[in-house]
Image (tube, rainbow, N blue to C red):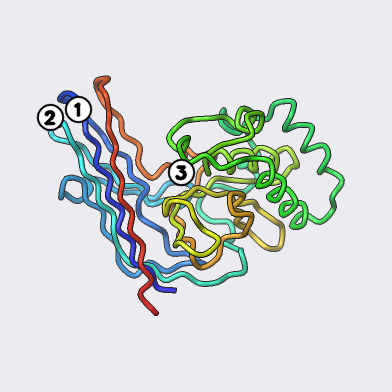
């Protein structure tokens, strides 16, 4: 499936910011499940000042703003061809072996409730079926709350509240998977709308490493494995590590964010 994506984010501040650095994970990588045909990233109409590939094979761009800026507009756009890989995203890539993704982070730490659920699932011998069962449990337990997408919630708190954003769904899934001894990570990206998809185009989901298969994607919000309608941007230990945009400012001020994302299928 050939997709055109345009992602625009406008950050406005209530006062001038002397120094500001943007770390962008807005370039989708070419992999077994997708091929990037063209892509560009601009910050206030300027290309990035420095780019590199990190240990997760994320394409990272660094940009800085002019002194005393009050607004920055980041535009990421291009075309990607996705390939149906039966939920299998990739084999291990980069410099990060799967076993490093067994470690907890503050957002994926398990409390007593998640430890109890992991213990209940521990007896399953088929890893893939175990992960599908886990995905269904998270999907059934949590209620989607779109207005919490910008808040930071740890996995245990989200589980106890019974509601959360796509990030919270992914954190709960990953926390339990790691308790089961299965390497797991967060994926940020885009999803083309479909009959079963009623959420925003920007999305966070999870992937887990299954021996003899590789990294397999799981979207607990929709209770499905990612297909050719999904475009991967970045991977991380948690949603912070896979965030498409991270901004470091020299002063504290009020920030207002306006985001527009357009996705269009081009091969129809």
Q: Disc 1 designates what residue? A: 19
Image height check: is 226 above or below 235?
below
Left or right: 55 as drawn, with respect to 27 = right
Residue 35 in the image, given as x and y percentages of width and height: 42, 69
Of the image marks 2 and 3, the number of the one nearer the N terminus: 2
Q: Disc 3 designates what residue? A: 242
Of the image marks 1 and 3, the number of the one nearer the N terminus: 1
As drawn, which residue projects farthest toward the right? Answer: 123
Q: Residue at x 35, y 47 (%)?
A: 60
**Label 1, label 2: how far apart the Cα atoms are:** 6 Å
Q: Residue at x 70, y 50 (%)?
A: 136
Residue 61 in the image, given as x and y percentages of width and height: 30, 47
The answer to whether the residue labelled 1 contacts the one labelled 2, judged by CB atoms less than 8 Å apart, is yes
Image height check: is 174 above or below 233?
above
Q: Tag 3, which secondary structure? A: loop
Of residues 16 and 234, the one nearer the viewer is 16
- Whether residue 72 is visible, yes or no, is yes
The answer to whether the residue labelled 1 contacts the one labelled 3, judged by CB atoms less than 8 Å apart, is no
Of the image marks 1 and 2, the number of the one nearer the N terminus: 1
Residue 76 in the image, given as x and y percentages of width and height: 28, 54
Q: Residues within 10 Å of mark 1 (few under 14, many from 20)?
A: some
Q: Residue at x 30, y 58 (%)?
A: 6
Image height check: is 34 above or below 168?
below
As drawn, which residue projects farthest toward the bottom? Answer: 268
Q: Residues within 10 Å of mark 2 (few under 14, many from 20)?
A: few
Residue 258 has which mark?
A: none
Q: Tag 1, which secondary structure? A: loop
Q: Quadrant of residue 261?
A: bottom left
Q: Residue at x 55, y 37 (%)?
A: 164
Q: Disc 2 designates what residue? A: 67
Residue 216 in the image, given as x and y percentages of width and height: 63, 58
């Amino acid at each position: 499936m050939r997709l055109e994506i345009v992602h625009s984010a406008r950050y406005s501040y209530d006062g001038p910011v002397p120094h500001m650095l943007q770390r962008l994970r807005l370039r989708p990588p070419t992999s077994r499940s997708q091929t990037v045909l063209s892509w560009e990233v601009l910050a206030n109409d300027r290309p990035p000042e420095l780019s590199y590939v990190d240990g997760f094979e994320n394409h990272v761009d660094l940009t800085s703003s002019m002194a005393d800026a009050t607004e920055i507009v980041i535009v990421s756009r291009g075309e990607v061809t996705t390939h149906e890989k039966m939920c299998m995203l990739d084999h291990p890539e980069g410099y990060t072996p799967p076993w490093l993704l067994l470690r907890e982070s503050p957002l994926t730490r398990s409390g007593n409730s998640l430890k109890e659920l992991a213990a209940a699932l521990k007896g399953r011998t088929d890893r893939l079926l175990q992960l599908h069962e886990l995905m269904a449990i998270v999907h059934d337990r949590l209620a989607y709350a779109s207005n919490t997408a910008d808040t930071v919630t740890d996995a245990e708190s989200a589980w106890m509240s019974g509601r959360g954003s796509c990030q919270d769904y992914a954190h709960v899934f990953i926390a339990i998977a790691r308790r089961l001894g299965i390497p797991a990570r967060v994926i940020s990206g885009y999803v083309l709308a479909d009959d079963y998809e009623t959420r925003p185009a920007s999305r966070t989901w999870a992937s887990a490493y299954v021996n003899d298969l590789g990294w397999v994607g799981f979207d607990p919000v929709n209770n499905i494995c990612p297909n050719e309608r999904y475009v991967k941007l970045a991977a991380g230990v948690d949603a912070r590590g896979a965030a498409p945009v991270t901004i470091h400012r020299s002063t504290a001020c009020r920030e207002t964010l306006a985001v527009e994302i357009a996705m269009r299928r081009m091969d129809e």
